[in-house]
Amino acid sequence: MFGLDEKCSVMGVFNVPEAAKFTYFGLFSLQHRGQEAAGIASSDGEKLHITKGRGLVTQVFDEKKLSLLKGNSAIGHTRYSTAGEDSVLDAQPIFARYDLGQIAVVHNGNLTNARIVRDELIKEGAIFQTFMDTENLIHLIARSKKEHLYDRIIEALGKIQGAYSLIFLSRKKMFAVRDPHGFRPLCMGKLGDGWVVASETCAFDLIGAEYVRDIKPGELVVFEEKKEPKSIQVFEPTPHKCIFEFIYFARPDSYIFGKSVYELRKRMGRELAKEYPIDADIVVPVPDSGVAAALGYSEESKIPYEMGIIRNHYVGRTFIEPTQAIRDLKVKMKLNPIKEVIKNKRVIVIDDSIVRGTTSKKIVNILKEFGAKEVHMRISAPPTIGPCYYGVDTPSKEELIASKMSVEETRKYIGADTLAYLSIDGLLRSVGNDQSYCMACFDGNYPVPNLN
Ligand code: AMP
């Protein structure tokens, strides 16, 4: 099975004593970006140490394992994948020994020409250890004839396409790089005398690091002891930042692409209330994904906000189990309404997206069971009409309800009294009418072709 979608988190700590511990806590904050596997590689200046495994960050690491990850620099990863065989081999960091020494890499994103590059490498004799697109990079670097790792990384980047926020660790240096489109976020911060890099700023908050700036699309930053980080603009930036990070994926307490996720989500809710008002008694979010947008909708519409549905936090995201039967059960395990809040009310329910329609259908059904008089579903994003090739897990086009049903057909399918989605213009207004976003899942304009 090849072509796993990787919607992950990456974290790097450079020149900070006990770097692995800081990486651990950073990954803990980034756990929402991937719950399947976690790993950390550290460097003590002489050699790299690595631990990775399946499960949550707290399951993979304990005090003893962390204490073996010696050194002042470390990189880490949490993995989110829904396809393929789950194997610890597919956990990151990927580590290798090669002619220049040792190297480890972590990747958030998805390479769109991975299959072609991999096939070529295999033809030339490369022996792959994993099914991950990221492994291509290690082979390209190991096979390069250039003298320095820095030049080898740049040469390898020239051969890959798609979405990548990457952190490389060698014995003495750390390298952070973002693809020219900047699909996935990557932020840089200061921690004491050292530096940190992470997918989202919420990782900095926990470890007491100070956000400095985003790594720019197409930029490579080299971290080296006793030197200021060196920035090289490897590629001309052509920004297509993932707008779905704002809608769903990132944590609301993060700043990504330089903006507050929470603020933007609230604005999406406000825009939705302006575009699709309706007379009702309460506004209820689907927790947690609809909370900020529901607050915005409530503020704009002046209809009271109520926590009418409670989420059981001990259940993973509904996407993680692959079969439909289990997905259905999981929605019920996860969300339960409060009868006193719902009964005899006209309810506006807010969620961030409808993908297959499973969640919305169950929610409408359950709210009616609990006595709601009317259920008006409002979605704080446009209809999802296409899969993502750049690192967000979405099912194939055939499984996306909005690609095969009109809004009215979807409304009937989920059983709501009304259904409305935020328009593409409304979404753009919410993010400040900035055109530098990728919205391929909503408008079908794919900035990079998928060659896999
Ligand atoms: P569905 O039940 O298939 O319509 O999926 C919609 C639900 O999944 C919503 O509650 C979303 O918040 C959530 N969701 C949307 N996109 C993703 C994603 N890429 N991974 C996990 N959950 C998602």
Image (spheres, rainbow, N blue to C red):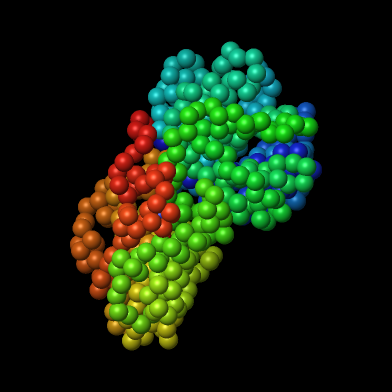
Does any portion of residue 110 appear in the rendered image? Answer: no
Give the image location of residue 447, x and y in percent. Answer: 36, 36
User: Quadrant of the image for the C terminus?
Assistant: top left
Q: Is residue 239 left or right of residue 277?
A: right
Does any portion of residue 23 appear in the rendered image? Answer: yes
| Residue under the image location 29 percent in, 44 percent down | 444
Q: Is residue 263 left or right of residue 351?
A: right
| Residue under the image location 48 percent in, 39 percent down | 182
Give the image location of residue 63, x and y in percent. Answer: 75, 51
Give the image location of residue 69, x and y in percent. Answer: 74, 40
Is 77 situated above or below 56?
above
Is 304 situated above or below 381?
below
| Residue under the image location 52 percent in, 53 percent down | 259
Between residue 373 and residue 213, name the one nearer to us.
213
User: Quadrant of the image for the N terminus?
Assistant: top left
| Residue under the image location 43 percent in, 19 percent down | 120
State the image quarter where residue 319 is shown.
Answer: bottom left
Between residue 246 and residue 163, name the one nearer to us.
246
Between residue 358 and residue 64, name the one nearer to us.
358
Q: Quadrant of ligand 1?
A: bottom left
Between residue 113 and residue 119, name the one nearer to us.
113
Give the image location of residue 13, x and y in percent. Answer: 69, 42
Is 388 situated above or below 233?
below
